Image (cartoon, rainbow, N blue to C red):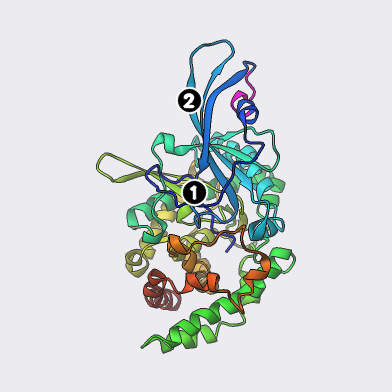
Amino acid sequence: LLSAYCCLLPPRFIYRKMAWEIPSWLDETFLAIVLQGDDTQNVSIVKFSVKPAVGLGENYSSQIFRASVQYKTKESVTEHSTSLIIKAPHTKGLAAELIGMLDVVDKEKRVYTELLPRIYDKINHEFGPKYLKCPLDDVLVLQDLNEEGYEMAKRHQQLDFSHCALVLSSLAKYHACSVPILKETPTLVQSLGTESLYSNDSLIGQQMKGWVAPCLNIVSEIFKNMDGCEEYVELLSNKQDIWDSLVESFKPREDRLNVLNHGDFWVNNMLFKYNHSGVVTEAKLIDFAVPRYMSPAADIVYFIWSSANEEVREDRIEELVDVYLHSLNKTLEQLQCEERLSKVELTEEMKSLSDWALTLICQFLPIVLTDPKDAISMEELTVADLDIANPTTQMMKMYQGKQFLAALPTALRHYKKWAST
């Protein structure tokens, strides 16, 4: 559940009415300090407006605002305009409780200030939005990529092969760059990549442990009421005790290639640019809040089983693996790294995460495919509401959504085919 992040919706997105308020600190003084940065020229705000950057149910980890600002510098009468994305932590409810168990704000800030600049120096490639210095420790201010023509895909439609291939090629470059950076600054990569969600040593890990089996049970009960789905009921009944397997599979293996994974690599955490014909041409990554150091297979498995459409999962996973490997190994060569990853190795590592792929279908796919009208406000929930063994009506809406119920048998069919070959 914590993985449902997003940012920077396209301008055409129509916001549902929702309860929100501008934080008291998000004022002219704050914006002037941000826009001035390290410049010695004072900035004065002419006018600004703030609105939610995402709709209800599109982000569960933070409050995200879009600030449209007109300003000028002290030495000039010329007015400038810009748009900023401002991420602030929830102050109440479930999200505040969960985020309190993680170090997501500090980690994401370190990715922007310490990791990404090192990557840019190595391959001159900007993976995400520019970071702007902020006077508040728990707030992030980022470039609004909408101004450069980037927009988010529609999560409930999932992604076709062209989108998948483009974003996995970019991901491979990101992964590859972490290899030499690990050698140069091992403490940076290792501290950013410490696993928290699938761990017996963290508070959030203990929460996750309590959610896995009940989510599998919910989906099993759904299949019991579907004709011809008995095999999926049996499959899920044999996977009730997989927590230890999950914890083990998220540990880096010394005998294999390990990279700094994005960690939350799904459709809402990537932005796309299109040409005049509507063909996707570029991709950017966003929300680097939960990186993990382990096999690169983690990001790929997460992406395929949360964000690739049915046609891709049915017939084109192997092609995506080829696209990823070509980009990864080419970038490693450019970086003069001796490490390489073979197709056999990557396929084996992806299959070693097959239990996780199943939990993604049962835990996360309902979120991806949920109807906006059934979206959950995380400030209205508490950890107590996530007693998955006794789910509330609000939580069950995700599992009873028409699109999820229609997609579920096909997703399990694709999973069985993939896991068994």
Instruction: Measure the C-alpha gap from mark 1 to mark 2.
Output: 21 Å
Residue at the (66%, 59%) spot, across then down: 93
- Identity, as a three-letter code, of the amino acid under mark 2: Ser
Asked whether, in this view, residue 371 is left or right of residue 258, the answer is left
Magenta segment, which residues?
Answer: 34-39
Per the rendering, the mark at residue 54 is 1
Q: Counting other residues with Cα less than 10 Å from the Cα at mark 1, is it few (<14), some (14-19), or many (20 or more)?
A: many
Q: Is residue 243 above or below residue 21?
A: below
Determine the residue positioned at 53% across, 62% down: 376
Secondary structure category for the residue under label 2: strand
x and y, in percent, of residue 129 in the image = 51, 38
Give the secondary structure at mark 1. loop
Judge whether residue 188 is colored magenta: no
Is residue 199 at all visible to an observer of this figure? Answer: no
| N-terminal label among 1 and 2 | 1
Residue pictured at 49% horizontal, 61% vertical: 375
The type of residue carrying mark 1 is Val
Q: Nearer the viewer, residue 413 or 170?
A: 413
Q: Nearer the viewer, residue 137 or 193?
A: 137
Question: Residue 274, image x and y in percent?
Answer: 33, 42
Q: Is residue 279 left or right of residue 100?
A: left
Q: Position of residue 269 (x, y in %)?
A: 49, 51
Total tally of numbered discs in the picture: 2
Q: Report if the CB atoms under discs 1 and 2 are less than 8 Å apart.
A: no
- Which residue is nearer to you in this view: 373 or 182? 373
> In the image as oriented, which residue stretches furthest toward the left?
277
* Residue 254: percent from left, percent from top: 65, 61
Residue 358 appears left or right of 103: left
Q: Which residue has dot 2 on it? A: 81
Q: Does the stretch in magenta take in 38? A: yes
Q: Quadrant of the N terminus?
A: bottom right
